[in-house]
Image (tube, helix red, strand yellow):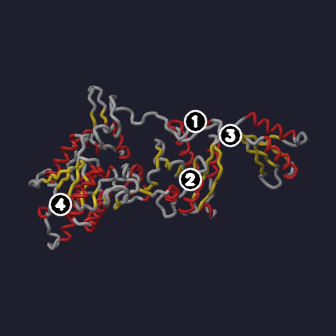
Amino acid sequence: MFNLYLLAPLEISAVKLKKMEIDEAIRESDDRRLKTKYNNAIYVVRRALALYSVEEVALSFNGGKDSTVLLHLLRAGYFLHKREQSHSNGVLTDHEVAFPIRTIYFESPSAFPEINSFTYETATTYGLQMDIIRLDFKSGLEALLEAKPIRAIFLGVRIGDPTAVGQEQFSPSSPGWPPFMRVNPILDWSYRDVWAFLLACKIPYCSLYDQGYTSIGSIHDTVPNALLCVNNSSSSKEKFRPAYLLSDGRLERAGRAKKFSLPVCRPAYPAVSNGMISVDSNKNSTLTATVIGVGDEILFGTVEDELGPSLCRKLHSIGWSVSQTAVLRNDVDSVAEEVERWKSTNDVVFIYGGVGPLHSDVTLAGVAKAFGVRLAPDEEFEEYLRHLIGDHCTGDRNEMAQLPEGITELLHHEKLSVPLIKCQNVFILTATNVTELDKEWDCLIELTRSSGLLVLMEPFLSKRMTTNLSDVEAAQALSKLCFEFPDLYIGCYRKSRLAPLIISFEGKDQTRLESAVEALSKKFPAGQISEAN
């Protein structure tokens, strides 16, 4: 089922990094963000080593960049842990501390040969006690945990990985799996953080990463990242830049696709429509939206809400009906209750206000609670924020980069410095004024035309009629008119108590509007009803 692969440590060579050198390289780095990430990861490692004995922990290693980072964090963390326990007042040397943590490697026939070679070379270089398992992950763990007293396993899981949903830095294994504690020291690390660490510490990594691979799975579902392709018309052979030159960490998994005979250097974004609803089949129907504003300043009357009415008009212009508008205070539960109420009864919910790092910015937390998920660091969004606000976007858990986990889609547009946020059928807008809202809306409509995010239906048409009749005189005839034209929205209002009564007609059929206006005119003497300016 599994083999023990134990190699004696080699003499320290140029490629073997001392545990002290890793810690020193980070201390000497000017990258404040990397230092923060490193310190927090080391804390998790040392915390785990304090909770469990060395015999009770193991490292899951697969030869990839994330597990390579994890290996060296463990080596540094174990050294610092032992030095603290030492009676030599911190004079403990690297030579005195072997690395005793058991390493698990699931060997697969579909793994890249380069991954296998790098794994065995790493095991030899650092004298790892390596259990080679040739079973599937679950069966292999069951066999290993039956044979060994392992209670916790260090994993190189990062937020954004398919298996990361719901995990914390310490997370018990899922129901149905053998019981053990999952320890995730680099859970909140980004693609940038991984490469910053490897390069700062000059850590050897698998050669595939220098060939354009940015995320490595099996030989059946992994190709070089097309975004790193170097186009060379003089050569038919495709060439790629190294993985650490991928400027946008959000696209790390762009090479995770089935292999085709077509060239890898193809457009990164194929024009495929995978929208929520077909546009053409719904032109004459009506869909409903709820518009929610969040802000105590609106409720206190400190500022006037201009975004809500503007958003209603915009939805009206694409044929949507707004069934509900609300303004909520800065309270997570209030937002969660309102979103939960309307996301299931309306086709779409738009929410604005309360987005940011301040204590009053509760919108994202409220949306997450409405869907029953947690807020978690989003690597893709953090990359945007890092480019936008630079060094201010630091820390181990950047509050602005936390989004509802597992349900968030970022909608990118070249005109937007920060993408729009969509959580299933809830759109979260970051606009703070009408000008910003206009820009976000125009981008959303452009994205809709290319990918079908919303349904663009026939816009509402309107007619306005006016009369000097009193409300009492007009009431009975208007009530009958509503029964005669149930497909139209018929409303009445006055701009002031003494101003004329304005009767509004809203609908999508011009003929029906004209028929309703004609029917209204016939209910009163000639000249009593006229078209409003």
**Callout 2 touching callout 4 (CB < 8 Å):** no
Alpha carbon separation for disc pair 2 and 3: 22 Å
Residue at image mark 4: 100
- SS of the residue at dot 2? strand
Alpha carbon separation for disc pair 2 and 4: 53 Å
- Residue 129 in view of the camera: yes
Q: Which mark is residue 493?
A: none
Q: Nearer the viewer, mark 1 or mark 2?
A: 1
Q: Nearer the viewer, mark 3 or mark 1?
A: 1
Residue at image mark 2: 351
Q: Earlier in the sequence, mark 1 or mark 4?
A: 4
In the image, what residue type sits under mark 2? Ile
Q: Is residue 164 above or below residue 39?
A: above
Residue at image mark 3: 460
Q: Residues within 10 Å of mark 3 (few under 14, many from 20)?
A: many
For the C terminus, give its image quadrant: top right
Q: Which mark is residue 279?
A: 1
Alpha carbon separation for disc pair 1 and 2: 23 Å
User: x, y (%) of residue 67?
Assistant: 26, 52
What residue sits 11% from the left and 55% below the top? 9
**Callout 4 touching callout 3 (CB < 8 Å):** no
Q: Is residue 18 above or below residue 462?
A: below
- SS of the residue at dot 1? loop
Q: Quadrant of residue 526?
A: top right
Which one is in front, 131 or 227?
131
**Callout 3 touching callout 1 (CB < 8 Å):** no
In the image, what residue type sits under mark 3? Phe
User: x, y (%) of residue 158?
Assistant: 34, 53
**Callout 2 touching callout 3 (CB < 8 Å):** no
What residue sits 11% from the left and 62% below the top? 95
- SS of the residue at dot 4? loop
